[in-house]
Image (cartoon, rainbow, N blue to C red):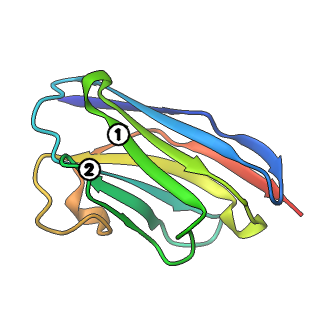
Amino acid sequence: QLQLMESGGGSVQAGGSLGLSCATSGHTYGVYCMSWFRQAPGKEREAVAGIYLDGETSYADSVKGRFTISRENAKNTLYLRMNSLKPEDTGMYYCAAARSCRGGLFSASTFTYWGQGTQVTVSS
């Protein structure tokens, strides 16, 4: 089993920055891909950014150039740096992990393991 725990959410004004972390524990071997998803009230969960074990990354168009995903394999930790935040970035942010990435980084069905989420609120 693999456990994920997010931290770093909070409230910020538009244009501000936040950094999220996702610590993993348990059987951390072979975690090939990890992604960040978010869900705003009344909306479906959407992928924000994803990263493979080799460091290859992908971003949703809505966050490209503003968000940076990274992972520190030695610490089994995933990060998301969010700059130039907008009110539409508000939502619960979840990290997700999988040992197989057949479905791709942006499909929720790819991921077996999920964190509990951390709230990000951006005010205008």
Q: Is residue 15 above or below residue 30?
A: below
Q: Position of residue 41 (x, y in %)?
A: 66, 64
Q: Residue at x 54, y 50 (%)?
A: 93
- x, y percent for residue 92: 59, 52
Q: Please say if the residues under marks 2 and 1 sit with CB atoms less than 8 Å apart.
A: yes
Q: Is residue 18 above or below residue 25?
A: below
> Observer-nearest residue: 122 or 16?
16
Q: Which mark is residue 71?
A: 1
Which amino acid does the dot numbered 1 rest on?
Arg
Residue 119 lies in quadrant: top right
Pick out the residue farthest to the bottom: 61
Residue at image position (61%, 34%) is: 8
The numbered disc on residue 55 is 2
Q: Quarter of the image containing the C terminus?
A: bottom right
In the figure, residue 25 lies in which quadrant?
A: top left
Left or right for 103, reference 117: left
